Amino acid sequence: MPEDSADDSRQAAQHDAQADEQRDALQRAVSCYLSTVLTMAKCVGAACPEVGGLYRHRLARLRARLAFDASPEAIEESCAVIEAVLDEFGAKASFYVAQHGIELRAAIATLDEIVRSLARREDFYAARLRQFASQMGAARYAAEPGQLQEVIELEAAGLLSCVESMGHEMQSMVTGMRNELRAVERRIQESEVTDPLTGLMNRREMERQIEARKNTGTAPVLVHFELTGEVNAEVMQQASARLGSQFRHNDFVSRWSDTEFMVLFQGPREIAQMRAEQIVPWVAGRYLLDNGENVQIGIEARLEQPELAA
């Protein structure tokens, strides 16, 4: 073999080897990037479950898309998406934690005042009972049985009135404490954005997102899914995983009710209709439960597009 041909062969082999090394390095880099995205998804979900669940789902869907198409353009676009998702999560989580602290401090102050009032009323009724005891001990009782009976009945009535008043006030204060705790729990829940069962966006947050979309002057495209059959919590969890995997990271998927999901679709109505038809057979079907039973679940889908206010 001529020397020039041998050199060309060696250079081609070296070039191929370098290309293989570059492809391997690129694949490893993409694999590390995807692993990092998955780790971030898990972290935001665990850091603040009341808020992070829906962001975990969005990042997980983004990772699934990148695993399917890990082109340089897709990876570059994902960086901006991840930054936006993390910024939004940080703001939501910070607000939730701050609101949680405000509500807890307000509840503690209210409960402390109720306890103080309870202690004051307890002292008041204790003083009255001691007064009754003192009066009964110092009283001169009539010798006639009829008069004695009358005096005892009056004293018993006064004592019973005191005890009943004390019971009513105690019950009223306990009710006030319970109502305050329920109100605090309700106010804290209003700042949560994640459904605790499925990890999807909850209905309150979806309604806020729909209103925000309307305020931009754009009619939201909504896809409504309703499960039919023996739907329980376990079915909802599995169905949410199937449903969530079929939408893009920028589509908002929420649990709407005990058997319903609502999706805020980022795109035209025609594409949403097509996607809904494709997703129905994927979500419907047989579900295997932890107890070994199988249940057949159906699903109905329809599009909704609320009109904008005039």
Image: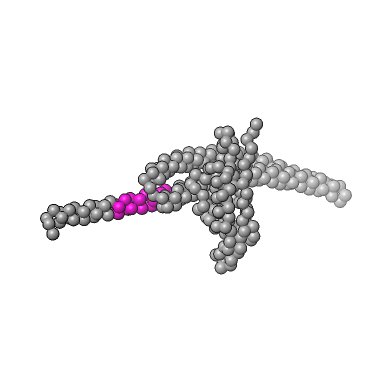
The image shows residue 47 at horizontal and vertical percentages of 46, 47
Is residue 132 on the magenta stretch? no
Q: How many marks?
A: 0
At x 38%, y 44%, the residue is 73
Give the colour scheme shown: one colour
**Left or right, 61 with reference to 136:** left
Q: Residue furthest top?
A: 310
The C terminus lies in quadrant: top right
Residue 241 seen in the figure: yes
Magenta span dominant secondary structure: helix
Tell me where residue 165 appears, x and y as whole percent. 73, 43
Does residue 28 show up magenta in the picture? yes
Q: Quadrant of the N terminus?
A: bottom left
Relative image position of residue 74 (x, y in whole percent): 40, 45
Residue 161 appears left or right of 173: right
Q: Residue at x 51, y 39 (%)?
A: 95
Residue at 35% in and 50% down: 30
- From this viewpoint, which residue is outermost toward the front? 2
In the image shown, does 170 or 181 lie closer to the viewer? Answer: 181
Q: Is residue 193 visible?
A: no
Residue pictured at 17% horizontal, 53% vertical = 8
Residue 235 appears in which quarter of the rendering? bottom right
Please tell me whether residue 210 is drawn above or below residue 289 in the rendered image.
above
The one of 92 and 180 positioned closer to us in this rendering: 92
The location of residue 12, given as percent across then percent down, is 21, 54
Front residue of 99/29: it is 29
What span is colored magenta in the figure? 23-42
Q: Nearer the viewer, residue 171 or 225?
A: 225
Query: Can you name the residue that lies furthest to the left here?
Result: 3
